[in-house]
Amino acid sequence: MGFLKEGVHSNLTGVLELFEASHLAVQGEGLLVKAKAFSGQYLINNRKNMDVDLGNRVAHALELPCHWRVTWFDVRQQIHAYELKEDKNPILLELAKLNFNICQGLHLQDLQELSR
C-alpha cells in the first residue's frame, strides 16, 4: 500500500477504478501490477462495507474487468444496474432500453441478410 497516498484506499469507488485501470498495464509497468494486486485484494476484503450497487460493480469487475469485455454485451447489465438505482431518471432509462432494442433489431437484420 506504500504507493497510495494515505486516505485514498478508504474510497471504495476509487479503488475499484484503480483496479479497472490497472488492467491497462503493459509489460514492465511494475507499479500497475502492484496496484492491481493491492486493489483486487482490497476490494475482496472490503465487500461487506459496500452498498449493493457498488458490490455488484465490484463483483462484475473481479469476474471480468471492463477493459476485457465486449462493450455491447455489457450494455444490458449496465441498464439493469441503472434500473435498480433509487435516483434513476425514468426517461433516460426508457431511452436506453429503446436504444438497446433498436440496435439489437438492426444487428438481427444484418445477421439475417448475411446468412442468406
Image (cartoon, grey):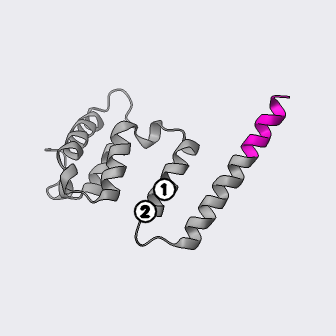
Q: Position of residue 45 (x, y in %)?
A: 17, 44
Q: Magenta stretch mostly in which secondary structure?
A: helix
In this picture, which residue range is highlighted in magenta? 106-116
Q: Is residue 21 visible?
A: no
Q: Is residue 9 magenta?
A: no
Q: Is residue 5 above or below residue 63?
A: below
Q: Is residue 107 magenta?
A: yes
Residue at the spot of label 1:
80
* Circles 1, 2 touching at the beta carbon (< 8 Å): yes
Q: The N terminus appears in which quarter of the rendering?
A: top left
In-front residue for pair 70/89: 89
Residue 62 relative to residue 111: left or right: left
Q: Quadrant of residue 23?
A: top left
Q: Is residue 102 visible?
A: yes
What residue is rendered at 39% in x and 31% in y?
26
Residue 84's disc number: 2
Amino acid type of the residue that numbered disc 1 sits on in the rendered structure: His
